[in-house]
């Protein structure tokens, strides 16, 4: 059963469902996807049945039922997407409950290192790297999750070494989201315990190292120049840093959302695909706006409540488990920059993993990684 557990964790946390078709072709991708859901069902039936995460199920039902009413695409695609979501959200509960801090960190660290390997050994003209996660912005979240979990490591030298590697990998994404949230995560950790300020050493050294040996990496010239300007002491390239920002993308959908706030306009309309409502070829890049735009106010309020609850419950554990608050903030803010929530298995799994742990009393948890 351990082997099956680690297979499922690999596929989920290393994004293999999305990575396989790009790396090995569509046939291999379809095989991995089918195998993934078959194994989830099998794993569910051969293990104890923990309590279902009702709030996520209710969110999924509300979103799919309301958004499905206005859906005008291929109905089989809608049913397939909904079925995958519910299989995952129900079948993965025991796996999330059974996954330790150490196991989650190991897989998150492997995912982070795939970004570094991508930058070193498989560089591209694009100059931004995502490793197993393909999209650099999506790759940033695995680095932030891994970094947050390092606050559980007792050995200071090991902790700093791992943080150094994770931050370097995160910088390879050249993601504004990663840089901003790295600062936020460090602030949360320092508030929980001033001794965590030593982690600033790893981050600072990582930035200096990348700036010093940047010629070894084929990094996006425009983005990296803006990154250098922040730490170079000269004029900050604010135009590049704010160019094509998410709020510009959100604004494209403002009228559509405001005109249909109660029930939305239907499934997949805000994904950037061609539809009768709006001639925009880029997705909304915001889960909250995607949900209210496609299914209206009720599912929107549900997801707001779920992630605010995760943050507030995590704060109760701040003195003992600062990683909970760090991960909760990372998840809640990542949804501001992504619109593929219902098939983002990494985000869904981590959300359920965190949800199960913040319900426990702080004194009952023993989570330190040796």
Image: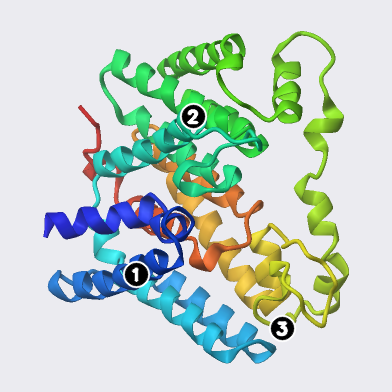
> Which residue is at a point 49% across and 48% down the rendered structure image?
133
Q: Is residue 51 above or below residue 247?
A: below
Image quadrant in which the N terminus is located: bottom left
Q: Position of residue 288 (x, y in %)?
A: 66, 62
* Element carrying mark 1: helix
Question: Which badge, 2 or 3, is on the more N-terminal residue?
Answer: 2
Image quadrant in which the C terminus is located: top left
Between circles 2 and 3, the one closer to the viewer is: 2
**Residue where numbered disc 2 is placed:** 169
* Element carrying mark 2: helix
> Which residue is at a point 66% across and 76% down the rendered structure image?
268
Q: Nearer the viewer, residue 122 or 65?
A: 122
Question: Which badge, 3 or 1, is on the more N-terminal residue?
Answer: 1
**Residue where numbered disc 3 is placed:** 263
Between circles 3 and 1, the one closer to the viewer is: 1
Task: Please say if the residues under marks 2 and 3 sit with CB atoms less than 8 Å apart.
Answer: no
Give the quarter of the image for residue 48.
bottom left
**Residue where numbered disc 1 is placed:** 31
Tally the marks: 3
Q: Residues within 10 Å of mark 2 (few under 14, many from 20)?
A: many
How are the residues colored?
A: rainbow
Q: Nearer the viewer, residue 355 or 295?
A: 295
State how far apart marks 2 and 3 are (Cα).
41 Å
Between circles 2 and 1, the one closer to the viewer is: 1
Question: Which badge, 2 or 1, is on the more N-terminal residue?
Answer: 1
Q: Is residue 191 visible?
A: no
Q: Position of residue 369 (x, y in %)?
A: 24, 31
Q: Is residue 236 visible?
A: yes
């Amino acid at each position: 059963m351990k082997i099956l557990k680690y297979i499922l964790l690999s596929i989920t946390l290393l994004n293999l469902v999305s990575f396989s078709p790009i790396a090995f072709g569509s046939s291999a991708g379809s095989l991995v996807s089918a195998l993934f859901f078959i194994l989830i069902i099998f794993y569910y039936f051969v293990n104890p049945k923990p309590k279902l995460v009702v709030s996520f199920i209710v969110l999924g039902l509300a979103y799919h039922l309301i958004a499905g009413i206005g859906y005008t695409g291929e109905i089989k695609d809608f049913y397939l997407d909904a079925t995958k979501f519910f299989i995952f959200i129900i079948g993965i509960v025991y796996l999330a409950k059974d996954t330790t801090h150490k196991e989650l960190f190991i897989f998150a660290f492997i995912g982070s290192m795939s970004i570094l390997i991508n930058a070193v050994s498989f560089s591209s003209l694009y100059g931004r790297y995502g490793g197993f996660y393909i999209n650099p912005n999506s790759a940033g979240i695995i680095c932030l999750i891994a970094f947050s979990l390092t606050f559980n490591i007792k050995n200071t030298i090991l902790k700093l070494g791992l943080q150094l590697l994770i931050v370097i990998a995160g910088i390879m994404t050249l993601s504004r989201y990663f840089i901003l949230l790295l600062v936020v995560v460090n602030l949360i950790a320092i508030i929980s315990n001033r001794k965590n300020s030593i982690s600033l050493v790893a981050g600072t050294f990582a930035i200096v190292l990348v700036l010093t040996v940047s010629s070894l990496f084929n990094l996006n010239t425009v983005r990296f120049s803006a990154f250098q300007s922040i730490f170079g002491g000269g004029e900050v390239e604010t135009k590049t840093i704010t160019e094509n920002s998410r709020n510009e993308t959100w604004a494209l959908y403002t009228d559509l959302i405001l005109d249909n706030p109660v029930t939305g306009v239907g499934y997949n309309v805000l994904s950037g695909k061609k539809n009768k409502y709006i001639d925009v070829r880029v997705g909304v890049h915001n889960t909250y706006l995607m949900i209210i735009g496609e299914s209206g106010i009720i599912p929107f309020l549900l997801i707001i409540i779920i992630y605010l609850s995760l943050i507030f419950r995590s704060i109760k554990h701040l003195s003992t488990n600062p990683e909970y608050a760090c991960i909760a903030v990372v998840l809640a803010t990542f949804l501001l920059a992504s619109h593929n929530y219902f098939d983002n298995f990494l985000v869904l799994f981590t959300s359920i993993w965190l949800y199960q742990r913040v319900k426990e009393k702080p004194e009952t948890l023993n989570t330190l990684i040796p």
